[in-house]
Image: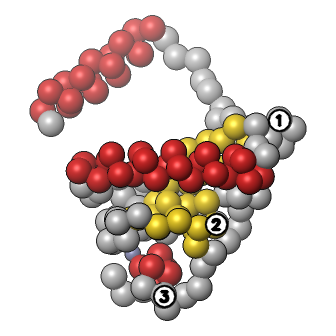
Amino acid sequence: MEDCIFCKIINGEIPSNKIYESENFVAFLDIMPINPGHTLIVSKKHYENMDELPGELGEELLRVIKTVARAIVKAVNADGYNIGMNNGRAAGQLVMHAHIHIIPRFKEDGLKSWPQKRMDDSKLREIGKKIKKEIDKI
Ligand code: AMP
Ligand code: ZN
């Protein structure tokens, strides 16, 4: 894809700190890390988001995530890690080329978890029903 920064990294037009590569994915350090070791796992082919990523790549992707996460935790002596993926602008996706964030976490890193909200049981049930209906259509 023209004008896609991650495609440019993958085809070598733009440099990156690449740490790992598999058949269909590359992993390189995020240029503006949340914590040291923050890494992006990126599909070699240009898929926009999770919806477009072929399901057949799931097993390989999980393997890459686990390998890279284990290595990061050891390398930076992390206490844990988050796996994140932003899908769509509303979810904070800035680069429209599918990628997974591995964010090492430290006990006192000061990062807050997402703000949760209370919700009525009836509303929870209603939303659950709607989602189940949509799942049946897939
Ligand atoms: P997202 O909001 O999930 O689309 O995240 C995009 C991520 O890509 C951000 O965390 C950026 O810091 C990161 N990023 C943008 N440009 C580069 C680059 N040239 N090399 C490495 N990471 C980048
Ligand atoms: Zn791309």
Of residues 64 and 40, which is closer to you in this image?
64
On screen, 72 above or below 121?
below
Residue where numbered disc 3 is placed: 12
Q: Report whether residue 96 is seen.
A: yes
- In the rendered image, the residue lying farthest to the top is 121
Say few, some or many: other residues with alpha carbon within 10 Å of mark 3 (under 14 / 14 to 19 / 20 or more).
Answer: few
Residue where numbered disc 1 is placed: 107
Please report whichever mark, 3 or 1, sits nearer to the chain's N-terminal start. 3
Q: Amino acid at mark 2?
A: Asp
Q: Amino acid at mark 3?
A: Gly
Of residues 25 and 93, which is closer to you in this image?
25
The residue shown at (33%, 46%) is 59
Question: Cβ(mark 1) to ligand 1 < 8 Å?
Answer: no
- In the rendered image, the residue lying farthest to the left is 137
Residue where numbered disc 2 is placed: 30
Question: Cβ(mark 2) to ligand 1 < 8 Å?
Answer: yes
Task: Give how far apart the Cα atoms at labels 2 and 1 are.
Answer: 21 Å
On screen, 26 above or below 113?
below
Q: Assign the C terminus to one quadrant of the image.
A: top left
